[in-house]
Image: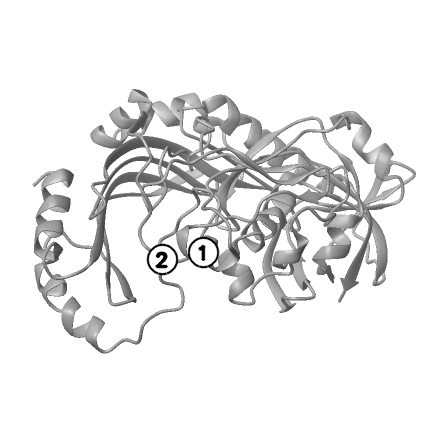
Amino acid sequence: MTLWELAEASARTLKDRFEEYEVIVVNEREIMLKLANGEPSVTQSWNRYTITVYVTKNGKIFQTSLSSTSPGEVLEKLDTILATLAPSPLYAPLPEPTGRDYENTDERIIEIVDSGDLSRISEDLELDQAGNWAGTIRLASEERVLVNSNNASLHGKKTLFNGYMRVFADEDSSGQWSWTSTMYRPDIAKKAVGAAARLAEECSSLPKRKIESGNYRVLLSPMVAGNLLEIVARSASGGAMLFGFSFFKKEDLEATVASEKLTLYDKPREKELPGYSLFDDEGVATRDKPVIEKGVLKNILHNSKTAKLFGAETTGNAGLLMPEPFNLDVASGDLKDDEMLEALGDGIYITNNWYTRFQNYPEGLFSTVARDAVIIVEGGKPVGCTSRVRIADSMKRLLSNIEGVGATLWQIQWWEVSTPTRLPHLLVSSARITSE
């Protein structure tokens, strides 16, 4: 059964039972190579089908997703489930479908996924020359079909080449970097591995030092900035604001929320990044838009539901329930690679992070743990490496303290940056650092 046949068969079972319905069927074929100690360790492949069903009746809404090509039993239970629900304050009619079909694929990726032959990757990335590396390399082909009661009938196809690599120079010195693209780009993969290797070697050559907790000038790598700015973009969603998971509020629209050095776009139509799509989950046409422009909050991301509650228009960012960004893109600055440490002066270069957690969403109070190379810089020169430190500050203060933006853009996506993001380094004039 094709995706079209599966979507249309599911829609037929819903047509006369609900006021509105939508079915999204996604097939993702993926192959993943894991490396450990510089050697391929595990190869895995998947052929996943996901069906998302959305129905409404008398102001009640229900959505479910299942990994199956036989959803009949679940679909038959929807009437019973919906009958138990109260009308939702989030309800809004499905909007007019304005999206278009798209295809953004690389046949080289499709060939590797279909064949399962990873020899080309090993050759192109020179894995036979790998040192002490650990990480994953992913290639995938995705096909998506959307049909709904508003006569939407949309189809999209795209590919993905994504990975991250952690490089160890010794037991205590490591660097990590990531890459992502819709195209097969060994060049950016090798550039990412090279960046990770340089950081590991740098830390290995420097003495290990402890630092005291306090306020420091901080240089954030694209890995760290990508994690934090993904949170910023998701906080600019109408859904996050409604449910209390944002440090922004409706009244912040057109207000200054960050340094004028920061411009952050949501770019669903950027063909190089894997979030590419010409329609959202309501069938509405996507559009590229600034989220923050020169420090000013220019757009709150909406689907039809949050737009109704905010008295606004959808921005083409559905999520059927929660609006979300597709691809993030930060405008480059004028800080060249060989000038960054000099511009930092005395401070800390944080190259990777994880475990980002909020203690208070409305105030933007958060912490995130630094990992891999954390380089101490004095007088613009690296003088040591440290560990067991974290940023513990306010996101509002961090955004306001952005002093410089790098000129070189990197395409990042890994488990701490799930939204494909193209961005440079960020220089922050003051951030609260805690040390154990």
Which of the 4 quarters of the picture holds residue 308? bottom left
- 417 with respect to 340 (left or right): left
Q: CA distance from mark 1 to mark 2?
A: 7 Å
In the rendered structure, the answer to whether residue 165 lies left or right of residue 73 reads right
Q: Position of residue 316 (x, y in %)?
A: 43, 42
Among all residues in the image, which is located at the extreme front? 311
* Residue 113 image-quadrant placement: top left
Of residues 89 and 261, the one nearer the viewer is 89
Q: Is residue 129 above or below residue 239?
A: above
Tell me, yes or no, whether the two marked residues, 1 and 2, touch with CB atoms within 8 Å: yes
**Residue at x 17%, y 61% (from the top left corner):** 18
In the rendered image, residue 381, in percent from the top left (x then y), is placed at 86, 36
- Amino acid at circle 2: Ala
58 relative to 2 in the view: left or right: right
Identity, as a three-letter code, of the amino acid under mark 1: Lys
Q: Nearer the viewer, residue 265 or 143?
A: 265
Q: Check disc 2 and report the residue beneath it.
A: 92
Residue 148 is situated, as x and y percent measured from the top left of the image, at 21, 47
Query: From this viewpoint, which residue is outermost toward the bottom?
Result: 84
Q: Give the residue pinned by disc 1.
A: 308
Q: Judge the density around disc 1: few (<14), some (14-19), many (≥20) Cα neighbours within 10 Å.
A: some
Location of residue 264 (image quadrant): top right
- For residue 258, the mark is none
